[in-house]
Image (spheres, grey):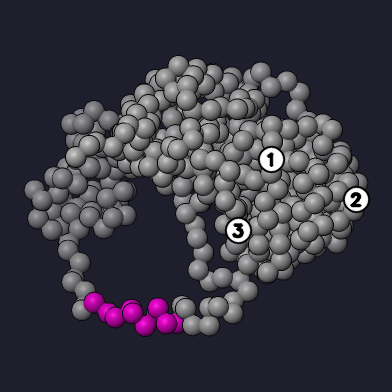
Amino acid sequence: MHERSSVGELANQLRRELDRYSPGGKLPSSRALVERFRVSPVTVSRALAQLAAEGLVVTRPGAGAFRARPRPSGGPAGDTSWQEVALSADGAADLVPRSVDASGVLASLTAPSPGVVEFNGGYLHPSLQPERAMAAALSRAGRRPGAWGRPPMEGLFELREWFARSIGGAVTAAEVLVTAGGQSALTTALRALAPPGAPVLVESPTYPGMLAIARAAGLRPVPVPVDADGVRPALLADAFRATGARVFVCQPLFQNPTGAVLAPGRRGEVLRIAREAGAFVVEDDFVRRLVHEDAGPLPRPLAADDPDGVVVHVGSLTKATSPSFRVSALAARGPVLERLRAIQVVDTFFVPRPLQEAALELVGSPAWPRHLRALSAELKARRDMMTSALRLHLPDLSLPHIPSGGYHLWLRLPDGMSEPALTAAALRAGVAVTPGRPYFSAEPPAAHIRLSFAAVAGGEEIAEGVRRLRTACAEVAAPPATR
Protein backbone atom coordinates (compact mmCIF):
# COMPACT_ATOMS: atom_id res chain seq x y z
CA MET A 1 0.00 0.00 0.00
CA HIS A 2 1.24 3.49 -0.77
CA GLU A 3 2.61 5.42 2.21
CA ARG A 4 0.14 8.28 1.73
CA SER A 5 -2.92 6.03 1.89
CA SER A 6 -1.51 4.25 4.97
CA VAL A 7 -1.13 7.58 6.76
CA GLY A 8 -4.69 8.60 5.92
CA GLU A 9 -6.16 5.25 7.01
CA LEU A 10 -4.27 5.26 10.31
CA ALA A 11 -5.28 8.86 11.01
CA ASN A 12 -8.93 7.96 10.35
CA GLN A 13 -8.73 4.96 12.67
CA LEU A 14 -7.13 6.97 15.49
CA ARG A 15 -9.69 9.75 14.99
CA ARG A 16 -12.52 7.26 15.46
CA GLU A 17 -10.95 5.93 18.67
CA LEU A 18 -10.29 9.28 20.36
CA ASP A 19 -13.51 9.08 22.40
CA ARG A 20 -11.93 6.23 24.37
CA TYR A 21 -9.62 8.75 26.02
CA SER A 22 -10.51 11.59 28.33
CA PRO A 23 -9.21 15.08 27.45
CA GLY A 24 -5.53 15.11 28.29
CA GLY A 25 -5.42 11.31 28.31
CA LYS A 26 -2.40 9.60 26.83
CA LEU A 27 -2.68 7.63 23.58
CA PRO A 28 -0.77 4.37 23.05
CA SER A 29 2.94 4.75 22.38
CA SER A 30 4.27 4.97 18.84
CA ARG A 31 5.81 1.52 19.26
CA ALA A 32 2.45 0.08 20.30
CA LEU A 33 0.74 1.67 17.30
CA VAL A 34 3.42 0.28 14.95
CA GLU A 35 2.88 -3.24 16.31
CA ARG A 36 -0.92 -3.03 16.38
CA PHE A 37 -1.46 -1.63 12.90
CA ARG A 38 1.66 -3.15 11.30
CA VAL A 39 2.81 0.11 9.77
CA SER A 40 6.15 1.91 9.79
CA PRO A 41 7.20 4.39 12.51
CA VAL A 42 7.17 7.09 9.82
CA THR A 43 3.49 6.34 9.09
CA VAL A 44 2.62 6.60 12.79
CA SER A 45 4.53 9.86 13.13
CA ARG A 46 2.79 11.39 10.10
CA ALA A 47 -0.67 10.24 11.23
CA LEU A 48 -0.18 11.77 14.68
CA ALA A 49 1.14 14.97 13.07
CA GLN A 50 -2.01 15.13 10.97
CA LEU A 51 -4.23 14.82 14.04
CA ALA A 52 -2.12 17.41 15.84
CA ALA A 53 -2.58 19.81 12.95
CA GLU A 54 -6.35 19.28 13.27
CA GLY A 55 -6.17 20.16 16.96
CA LEU A 56 -7.30 16.69 18.06
CA VAL A 57 -4.11 15.55 19.76
CA VAL A 58 -1.10 17.18 21.39
CA THR A 59 2.35 15.63 21.00
CA ARG A 60 5.06 16.18 23.60
CA PRO A 61 8.62 15.13 22.77
CA GLY A 62 9.73 12.32 25.04
CA ALA A 63 6.26 11.98 26.62
CA GLY A 64 4.00 10.83 23.78
CA ALA A 65 0.68 11.89 22.27
CA PHE A 66 -2.35 13.03 24.27
CA ARG A 67 -5.95 13.79 23.42
CA ALA A 68 -6.33 17.56 23.14
CA ARG A 69 -8.60 19.36 25.54
CA PRO A 70 -11.69 20.85 23.89
CA ARG A 71 -11.40 24.41 22.76
CA PRO A 72 -13.58 26.98 24.50
CA SER A 73 -16.74 27.64 22.52
CA GLY A 74 -16.68 30.77 20.43
CA GLY A 75 -18.89 33.76 20.93
CA PRO A 76 -22.05 34.49 19.00
CA ALA A 77 -21.80 34.44 15.22
CA GLY A 78 -20.99 37.82 13.74
CA ASP A 79 -22.85 39.60 10.97
CA THR A 80 -20.76 39.72 7.79
CA SER A 81 -23.55 40.88 5.50
CA TRP A 82 -21.96 44.37 5.38
CA GLN A 83 -19.19 42.90 3.21
CA GLU A 84 -21.57 42.50 0.26
CA VAL A 85 -21.74 46.28 -0.02
CA ALA A 86 -18.01 46.84 0.56
CA LEU A 87 -16.99 44.22 -2.01
CA SER A 88 -19.43 45.42 -4.67
CA ALA A 89 -19.40 49.20 -4.31
CA ASP A 90 -18.40 50.96 -7.55
CA GLY A 91 -17.55 47.59 -9.10
CA ALA A 92 -18.87 48.61 -12.49
CA ALA A 93 -16.03 51.10 -12.86
CA ASP A 94 -13.25 48.61 -12.05
CA LEU A 95 -10.76 48.08 -14.87
CA VAL A 96 -9.34 45.13 -12.93
CA PRO A 97 -12.15 43.00 -11.48
CA ARG A 98 -12.04 42.29 -7.77
CA SER A 99 -14.12 39.13 -8.14
CA VAL A 100 -12.25 36.33 -9.94
CA ASP A 101 -13.72 33.19 -11.51
CA ALA A 102 -11.33 30.38 -10.53
CA SER A 103 -13.54 27.50 -11.69
CA GLY A 104 -11.33 26.70 -14.69
CA VAL A 105 -8.27 26.40 -12.45
CA LEU A 106 -10.01 24.47 -9.67
CA ALA A 107 -11.18 21.86 -12.18
CA SER A 108 -7.64 20.50 -12.47
CA LEU A 109 -6.58 21.13 -8.86
CA THR A 110 -9.48 19.67 -6.89
CA ALA A 111 -9.05 16.00 -6.00
CA PRO A 112 -12.16 13.89 -6.61
CA SER A 113 -13.81 11.88 -3.84
CA PRO A 114 -12.26 8.53 -2.86
CA GLY A 115 -13.10 5.80 -5.35
CA VAL A 116 -13.59 8.20 -8.26
CA VAL A 117 -11.28 7.66 -11.24
CA GLU A 118 -9.38 10.90 -11.80
CA PHE A 119 -9.54 11.58 -15.53
CA ASN A 120 -9.62 15.31 -14.75
CA GLY A 121 -6.19 15.62 -13.13
CA GLY A 122 -3.56 18.03 -14.38
CA TYR A 123 -0.51 16.49 -12.70
CA LEU A 124 1.35 13.19 -12.55
CA HIS A 125 0.09 10.42 -10.30
CA PRO A 126 2.42 9.93 -7.30
CA SER A 127 3.63 6.67 -8.85
CA LEU A 128 4.97 8.68 -11.84
CA GLN A 129 6.64 11.39 -9.79
CA PRO A 130 10.38 11.13 -9.03
CA GLU A 131 9.68 11.20 -5.30
CA ARG A 132 12.92 9.57 -4.17
CA ALA A 133 15.02 11.74 -6.46
CA MET A 134 13.23 14.89 -5.29
CA ALA A 135 13.61 13.92 -1.63
CA ALA A 136 17.31 13.23 -2.10
CA ALA A 137 17.76 16.49 -4.00
CA LEU A 138 15.98 18.47 -1.29
CA SER A 139 18.09 16.80 1.40
CA ARG A 140 21.33 17.60 -0.41
CA ALA A 141 20.15 21.12 -1.16
CA GLY A 142 19.44 21.82 2.49
CA ARG A 143 23.07 21.08 3.34
CA ARG A 144 24.55 23.38 0.68
CA PRO A 145 26.44 26.37 2.10
CA GLY A 146 24.11 29.36 2.14
CA ALA A 147 21.10 27.27 1.11
CA TRP A 148 18.82 29.06 3.56
CA GLY A 149 20.00 32.54 2.71
CA ARG A 150 18.41 35.06 0.39
CA PRO A 151 18.90 34.18 -3.29
CA PRO A 152 19.48 36.69 -6.09
CA MET A 153 16.16 38.30 -7.02
CA GLU A 154 16.40 36.91 -10.56
CA GLY A 155 17.19 33.39 -9.29
CA LEU A 156 20.34 31.36 -8.83
CA PHE A 157 22.71 31.92 -11.73
CA GLU A 158 23.37 28.19 -12.23
CA LEU A 159 19.65 27.45 -12.44
CA ARG A 160 19.05 30.32 -14.86
CA GLU A 161 21.93 29.00 -16.95
CA TRP A 162 20.37 25.53 -17.00
CA PHE A 163 17.03 26.94 -18.16
CA ALA A 164 18.80 29.02 -20.84
CA ARG A 165 20.55 25.91 -22.19
CA SER A 166 17.20 24.08 -22.19
CA ILE A 167 15.66 26.81 -24.34
CA GLY A 168 18.62 26.93 -26.72
CA GLY A 169 19.49 29.39 -29.43
CA ALA A 170 21.22 32.53 -28.21
CA VAL A 171 19.28 32.72 -24.92
CA THR A 172 21.58 33.44 -21.98
CA ALA A 173 21.26 33.19 -18.20
CA ALA A 174 21.05 36.99 -18.04
CA GLU A 175 17.75 36.77 -19.97
CA VAL A 176 16.11 34.30 -17.57
CA LEU A 177 14.12 34.85 -14.35
CA VAL A 178 13.32 31.96 -11.99
CA THR A 179 9.62 31.97 -11.07
CA ALA A 180 7.34 30.04 -8.73
CA GLY A 181 5.55 27.85 -11.26
CA GLY A 182 4.12 28.40 -14.72
CA GLN A 183 0.91 29.99 -13.45
CA SER A 184 2.91 32.66 -11.64
CA ALA A 185 5.08 33.23 -14.72
CA LEU A 186 2.04 33.68 -16.98
CA THR A 187 0.50 36.10 -14.48
CA THR A 188 3.67 38.20 -14.43
CA ALA A 189 3.92 38.16 -18.24
CA LEU A 190 0.35 39.28 -18.88
CA ARG A 191 0.56 42.02 -16.25
CA ALA A 192 3.75 43.28 -17.85
CA LEU A 193 2.60 43.21 -21.45
CA ALA A 194 -1.00 44.45 -21.50
CA PRO A 195 -2.86 47.18 -19.56
CA PRO A 196 -6.30 46.53 -18.03
CA GLY A 197 -9.02 46.66 -20.66
CA ALA A 198 -6.71 45.66 -23.52
CA PRO A 199 -7.36 42.72 -25.84
CA VAL A 200 -5.10 39.68 -25.70
CA LEU A 201 -5.12 37.06 -28.44
CA VAL A 202 -5.41 33.46 -27.26
CA GLU A 203 -5.61 30.10 -28.96
CA SER A 204 -9.06 28.56 -29.19
CA PRO A 205 -9.43 26.27 -27.36
CA THR A 206 -6.81 27.00 -24.71
CA TYR A 207 -5.77 26.50 -21.09
CA PRO A 208 -8.55 27.78 -18.73
CA GLY A 209 -6.00 28.90 -16.13
CA MET A 210 -4.54 31.36 -18.60
CA LEU A 211 -8.01 32.69 -19.46
CA ALA A 212 -8.62 33.17 -15.74
CA ILE A 213 -5.34 35.10 -15.40
CA ALA A 214 -6.27 37.36 -18.32
CA ARG A 215 -9.74 38.11 -17.02
CA ALA A 216 -8.48 38.68 -13.48
CA ALA A 217 -6.08 41.28 -14.92
CA GLY A 218 -8.96 43.02 -16.70
CA LEU A 219 -7.88 41.84 -20.16
CA ARG A 220 -10.21 40.78 -22.97
CA PRO A 221 -9.30 37.34 -24.40
CA VAL A 222 -9.88 37.19 -28.17
CA PRO A 223 -9.92 33.65 -29.64
CA VAL A 224 -7.82 32.55 -32.63
CA PRO A 225 -8.75 29.03 -33.82
CA VAL A 226 -6.32 26.11 -33.65
CA ASP A 227 -6.28 23.11 -35.97
CA ALA A 228 -4.13 19.95 -36.09
CA ASP A 229 -1.07 22.06 -37.04
CA GLY A 230 -1.50 24.67 -34.31
CA VAL A 231 -2.71 28.25 -34.57
CA ARG A 232 -3.82 29.37 -38.04
CA PRO A 233 -1.53 32.23 -39.17
CA ALA A 234 -4.03 33.92 -41.48
CA LEU A 235 -6.60 34.16 -38.69
CA LEU A 236 -3.90 35.35 -36.29
CA ALA A 237 -3.03 38.20 -38.65
CA ASP A 238 -6.72 39.06 -39.02
CA ALA A 239 -7.13 39.14 -35.24
CA PHE A 240 -4.16 41.48 -34.78
CA ARG A 241 -5.55 43.86 -37.40
CA ALA A 242 -9.11 43.76 -36.03
CA THR A 243 -8.23 44.26 -32.36
CA GLY A 244 -4.95 46.15 -32.23
CA ALA A 245 -3.76 43.61 -29.65
CA ARG A 246 -0.13 43.65 -28.57
CA VAL A 247 0.00 40.16 -27.02
CA PHE A 248 -0.62 36.63 -28.30
CA VAL A 249 -0.46 33.69 -25.85
CA CYS A 250 0.22 30.27 -27.33
CA GLN A 251 1.40 26.74 -26.58
CA PRO A 252 3.33 25.68 -29.70
CA LEU A 253 4.22 22.23 -28.33
CA PHE A 254 1.51 19.69 -27.35
CA GLN A 255 -1.08 22.41 -27.02
CA ASN A 256 -3.57 22.19 -24.15
CA PRO A 257 -6.13 20.79 -24.77
CA THR A 258 -5.78 19.66 -28.41
CA GLY A 259 -2.24 18.23 -28.21
CA ALA A 260 -1.34 19.97 -31.49
CA VAL A 261 2.24 20.90 -32.38
CA LEU A 262 2.78 24.13 -34.32
CA ALA A 263 3.81 23.03 -37.82
CA PRO A 264 7.32 23.97 -39.05
CA GLY A 265 5.91 26.17 -41.81
CA ARG A 266 3.84 28.15 -39.33
CA ARG A 267 6.54 28.88 -36.74
CA GLY A 268 8.23 31.65 -38.70
CA GLU A 269 4.87 32.99 -39.83
CA VAL A 270 3.65 33.43 -36.26
CA LEU A 271 6.80 35.33 -35.30
CA ARG A 272 6.66 37.48 -38.44
CA ILE A 273 2.99 38.36 -37.96
CA ALA A 274 3.55 39.31 -34.32
CA ARG A 275 6.64 41.36 -35.18
CA GLU A 276 4.78 43.30 -37.88
CA ALA A 277 1.96 43.97 -35.40
CA GLY A 278 4.45 45.27 -32.83
CA ALA A 279 3.26 42.55 -30.49
CA PHE A 280 4.70 40.01 -28.07
CA VAL A 281 4.22 36.24 -28.24
CA VAL A 282 3.96 34.59 -24.82
CA GLU A 283 5.19 31.03 -25.39
CA ASP A 284 3.86 28.65 -22.72
CA ASP A 285 6.20 25.66 -23.14
CA PHE A 286 4.62 23.75 -20.29
CA VAL A 287 5.01 20.05 -21.22
CA ARG A 288 8.24 19.81 -23.19
CA ARG A 289 9.49 17.23 -20.67
CA LEU A 290 6.33 15.12 -21.02
CA VAL A 291 7.21 13.94 -24.51
CA HIS A 292 6.08 10.43 -25.46
CA GLU A 293 8.52 7.71 -26.46
CA ASP A 294 7.40 7.69 -30.10
CA ALA A 295 7.48 11.47 -30.65
CA GLY A 296 10.76 11.78 -32.52
CA PRO A 297 12.88 14.96 -32.42
CA LEU A 298 11.08 17.95 -30.91
CA PRO A 299 11.02 21.42 -32.48
CA ARG A 300 12.98 24.05 -30.59
CA PRO A 301 11.11 26.60 -28.50
CA LEU A 302 10.04 29.65 -30.48
CA ALA A 303 12.30 31.70 -28.21
CA ALA A 304 15.35 29.88 -29.61
CA ASP A 305 14.63 31.28 -33.09
CA ASP A 306 13.74 34.81 -32.01
CA PRO A 307 16.59 37.38 -32.09
CA ASP A 308 14.27 40.38 -31.84
CA GLY A 309 12.71 39.86 -28.41
CA VAL A 310 9.24 39.05 -29.75
CA VAL A 311 8.88 35.94 -27.58
CA VAL A 312 8.44 35.88 -23.81
CA HIS A 313 9.10 32.26 -22.94
CA VAL A 314 7.62 30.31 -20.01
CA GLY A 315 9.18 26.95 -19.13
CA SER A 316 8.54 24.79 -16.08
CA LEU A 317 9.78 21.79 -14.12
CA THR A 318 6.46 21.26 -12.35
CA LYS A 319 4.60 19.04 -14.81
CA ALA A 320 7.46 16.53 -14.99
CA THR A 321 7.98 16.37 -11.23
CA SER A 322 5.25 17.27 -8.74
CA PRO A 323 2.57 19.95 -8.31
CA SER A 324 4.53 21.12 -5.26
CA PHE A 325 7.83 21.44 -7.16
CA ARG A 326 7.00 24.91 -8.36
CA VAL A 327 10.13 26.03 -10.18
CA SER A 328 9.79 27.69 -13.58
CA ALA A 329 11.46 30.26 -15.80
CA LEU A 330 10.58 33.42 -17.67
CA ALA A 331 12.92 34.26 -20.54
CA ALA A 332 12.81 37.54 -22.44
CA ARG A 333 15.11 39.84 -24.36
CA GLY A 334 15.20 43.65 -24.30
CA PRO A 335 13.56 46.27 -22.05
CA VAL A 336 10.61 43.97 -21.26
CA LEU A 337 12.90 41.85 -19.09
CA GLU A 338 13.30 44.66 -16.55
CA ARG A 339 9.53 45.12 -16.38
CA LEU A 340 9.01 41.41 -15.82
CA ARG A 341 11.65 41.41 -13.11
CA ALA A 342 10.13 44.42 -11.32
CA ILE A 343 6.64 42.91 -11.28
CA GLN A 344 7.91 39.59 -10.00
CA VAL A 345 9.91 41.21 -7.19
CA VAL A 346 6.90 43.28 -6.09
CA ASP A 347 4.54 40.29 -6.20
CA THR A 348 6.67 37.49 -4.73
CA PHE A 349 10.17 38.80 -3.86
CA PHE A 350 11.84 35.55 -5.02
CA VAL A 351 11.50 31.78 -5.23
CA PRO A 352 12.71 30.21 -1.94
CA ARG A 353 16.39 29.37 -2.23
CA PRO A 354 16.12 25.80 -0.86
CA LEU A 355 13.68 24.97 -3.67
CA GLN A 356 16.01 26.47 -6.29
CA GLU A 357 18.95 24.55 -4.83
CA ALA A 358 16.87 21.37 -4.89
CA ALA A 359 16.01 21.98 -8.55
CA LEU A 360 19.71 22.27 -9.36
CA GLU A 361 20.45 19.08 -7.47
CA LEU A 362 17.64 17.24 -9.23
CA VAL A 363 18.36 18.22 -12.84
CA GLY A 364 22.08 17.63 -12.31
CA SER A 365 21.66 14.12 -10.92
CA PRO A 366 21.78 10.83 -12.91
CA ALA A 367 18.24 10.19 -11.67
CA TRP A 368 16.84 13.04 -13.80
CA PRO A 369 17.44 11.61 -17.30
CA ARG A 370 16.39 8.17 -16.02
CA HIS A 371 13.13 9.64 -14.76
CA LEU A 372 12.43 11.41 -18.05
CA ARG A 373 13.07 8.23 -20.06
CA ALA A 374 10.82 6.15 -17.81
CA LEU A 375 8.12 8.82 -17.87
CA SER A 376 8.28 9.05 -21.67
CA ALA A 377 7.70 5.31 -22.02
CA GLU A 378 4.93 5.21 -19.42
CA LEU A 379 3.01 8.16 -20.88
CA LYS A 380 3.04 6.55 -24.34
CA ALA A 381 1.81 3.25 -22.87
CA ARG A 382 -1.00 5.00 -21.00
CA ARG A 383 -1.97 7.08 -24.04
CA ASP A 384 -2.21 3.91 -26.13
CA MET A 385 -4.24 2.12 -23.45
CA MET A 386 -6.75 4.95 -23.20
CA THR A 387 -6.96 5.40 -26.97
CA SER A 388 -7.60 1.69 -27.52
CA ALA A 389 -10.21 1.54 -24.76
CA LEU A 390 -12.05 4.56 -26.13
CA ARG A 391 -12.10 3.19 -29.67
CA LEU A 392 -13.39 -0.15 -28.41
CA HIS A 393 -16.01 1.02 -25.92
CA LEU A 394 -16.87 4.59 -26.98
CA PRO A 395 -16.43 4.84 -30.76
CA ASP A 396 -18.98 7.67 -30.96
CA LEU A 397 -16.60 10.00 -29.13
CA SER A 398 -14.44 11.59 -31.81
CA LEU A 399 -10.67 11.63 -31.21
CA PRO A 400 -9.36 13.78 -34.09
CA HIS A 401 -5.76 13.92 -32.87
CA ILE A 402 -3.58 11.52 -30.88
CA PRO A 403 -0.78 13.59 -29.34
CA SER A 404 2.83 12.46 -29.01
CA GLY A 405 3.34 14.43 -25.81
CA GLY A 406 1.43 15.71 -22.81
CA TYR A 407 -0.92 13.86 -20.52
CA HIS A 408 -4.43 14.02 -21.95
CA LEU A 409 -6.78 13.40 -24.88
CA TRP A 410 -9.30 15.89 -26.33
CA LEU A 411 -12.58 14.34 -27.49
CA ARG A 412 -15.54 15.80 -29.33
CA LEU A 413 -18.93 14.61 -28.14
CA PRO A 414 -21.63 13.42 -30.57
CA ASP A 415 -24.00 16.09 -31.79
CA GLY A 416 -26.80 16.59 -29.30
CA MET A 417 -24.94 15.15 -26.29
CA SER A 418 -24.94 17.64 -23.43
CA GLU A 419 -21.52 18.39 -22.00
CA PRO A 420 -22.80 19.33 -18.50
CA ALA A 421 -25.11 16.30 -18.43
CA LEU A 422 -22.27 13.94 -19.36
CA THR A 423 -19.90 15.47 -16.82
CA ALA A 424 -22.50 15.02 -14.06
CA ALA A 425 -23.41 11.49 -15.18
CA ALA A 426 -19.74 10.53 -15.30
CA LEU A 427 -19.26 11.65 -11.71
CA ARG A 428 -22.28 9.60 -10.65
CA ALA A 429 -20.71 6.64 -12.41
CA GLY A 430 -17.45 7.17 -10.52
CA VAL A 431 -15.21 8.93 -13.04
CA ALA A 432 -14.28 12.64 -13.08
CA VAL A 433 -13.81 14.21 -16.52
CA THR A 434 -13.01 17.79 -17.54
CA PRO A 435 -15.73 19.59 -19.54
CA GLY A 436 -14.61 21.39 -22.67
CA ARG A 437 -16.50 24.66 -22.24
CA PRO A 438 -13.93 26.38 -19.94
CA TYR A 439 -11.27 25.99 -22.68
CA PHE A 440 -13.09 28.40 -24.99
CA SER A 441 -13.03 32.17 -24.50
CA ALA A 442 -16.15 32.51 -26.67
CA GLU A 443 -18.97 30.19 -27.75
CA PRO A 444 -17.51 26.73 -28.53
CA PRO A 445 -18.16 25.17 -31.95
CA ALA A 446 -19.03 21.81 -30.36
CA ALA A 447 -19.16 19.97 -27.04
CA HIS A 448 -15.92 18.36 -25.82
CA ILE A 449 -14.36 16.65 -22.83
CA ARG A 450 -10.72 16.28 -21.84
CA LEU A 451 -9.45 13.01 -20.36
CA SER A 452 -6.15 12.80 -18.49
CA PHE A 453 -4.23 9.51 -18.41
CA ALA A 454 -1.42 10.73 -16.13
CA ALA A 455 -3.28 11.34 -12.86
CA VAL A 456 -4.49 7.74 -12.41
CA ALA A 457 -2.68 4.77 -10.91
CA GLY A 458 -2.17 2.80 -14.13
CA GLY A 459 -3.68 0.73 -16.92
CA GLU A 460 -6.33 -1.02 -14.83
CA GLU A 461 -7.68 2.30 -13.62
CA ILE A 462 -7.71 3.65 -17.18
CA ALA A 463 -9.75 0.66 -18.35
CA GLU A 464 -12.14 0.97 -15.41
CA GLY A 465 -12.53 4.71 -15.97
CA VAL A 466 -13.45 4.20 -19.62
CA ARG A 467 -16.01 1.53 -18.63
CA ARG A 468 -17.58 3.98 -16.18
CA LEU A 469 -17.58 6.70 -18.83
CA ARG A 470 -19.39 4.32 -21.20
CA THR A 471 -22.07 3.89 -18.52
CA ALA A 472 -22.41 7.67 -18.25
CA CYS A 473 -22.64 8.11 -22.02
CA ALA A 474 -25.35 5.46 -22.20
CA GLU A 475 -27.29 7.27 -19.49
CA VAL A 476 -27.07 10.63 -21.23
CA ALA A 477 -27.85 9.21 -24.69
CA ALA A 478 -30.83 7.17 -23.49
CA PRO A 479 -34.24 8.58 -24.52
CA PRO A 480 -36.29 10.02 -21.63
CA ALA A 481 -38.66 7.58 -19.99
CA THR A 482 -42.28 7.92 -21.12
CA ARG A 483 -44.82 8.77 -18.53
Q: Please state the extent of the stretch shown in magenta in the rendering.
A: 77-86
- Give percent across and percent down for residue 432: 39, 38
Extreme residue in the front direction: 483
Mark 1 lies on residue:
226
The image's mark for residue 350 is: none
**Residue 276, above or below 96:** above
Say which of marks 2 and 1 sits in front.
1
Vertical order, 21 against 397 (above or below): below
Residue type at mark 1 is Val
Residue at left offset 70%, top offset 48%: 224
Give the side of residue 283 with respect to residue 409, left or right: right
Question: Badge 1, how many Cα within 10 Å: few under 14, some, many 20+?
Answer: many
Tell me the element at label 1: strand
- Tell me residue 77's x, y (percent): 24, 77
- The reply to whether callout 3 and callout 1 are in contact (CB within 8 Å) is no
Would you call the spot at circle 2 few (<14 residues within 10 Å), some (14-19), or many (20 or more)?
few
Contact (CB < 8 A) between labels 3 and 2?
A: no
Which mark, residue 213?
A: 3
Let me know if residue 311 is in the magenta part. Answer: no
Which residue in the protein does label 2 denote?
308
Using the rendered image of the protein, determine whether residue 10 is visible from the camera's viewpoint.
Answer: yes
Amino acid under label 3?
Answer: Ile
Q: Residue at x 27, y 50 (%)?
A: 51
User: Is residue 479 found left or right of 345 in the rendered image?
Assistant: left
